[in-house]
Image: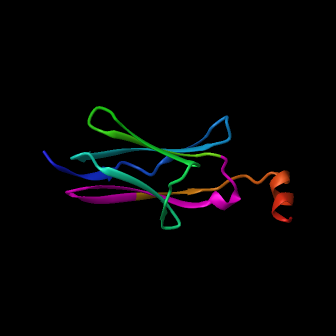
Amino acid sequence: MTLQPYFERAPSILFKPDGSVLFECLCNGNPEPEIKWLFKDKECVGERYVAKKKKMVGKYTCTLQIKNPSQADQGVYKVTATNNRGTHSVEQPLSLVQVGKEVFKTLD
């Protein structure tokens, strides 16, 4: 049975002890969907971004880890799933708490 991909809800956000940020969501679809994470209409690629997809029973866990996040990483992130039956996307805003060191760093 083929199935257009869909997300059950927007990604959850986890602030990890190492300082990174992890987005996580569940996706369904058959055949297996291609997953893309976007920020400001650009795909999240590069060494700071780690995207993973893991197959579970009938679903896929999709994650995006942002290493060393900064104030510039604040905004709306979009995750998109695509297969030959269609495309579905959901969005999640990210807000970071600014600490004193970063306030002074931005003024340099």
x and y, in percent, of residue 27 in the image? 34, 46
Question: Can you tell which quarter of the image residue 103 is in?
Answer: bottom right
Q: Which residues are magenta?
A: 68-89
Q: Is residue 20 magenta?
A: no
x and y, in percent, of residue 19 in the image? 68, 41
Q: Nearer the viewer, residue 102 or 43?
A: 43
Image point 83% across, 58% down: which residue? Answer: 105
Residue lying at the far left of the rendered structure: 1
x and y, in percent, of residue 58 in the image? 26, 36
Image point 63% across, 37% down: which residue? Answer: 16
Residue lying at the far front of the rendered structure: 47
Q: Is residue 73 magenta?
A: yes
User: How many discs appear?
Assistant: 0
| Image quadrant in which the N terminus is located | top left
Compared to residue 16, the image places residue 100 above or below, namely below
Compared to residue 87, the image places residue 17 above or below, namely above
x and y, in percent, of residue 32 in the image? 26, 45
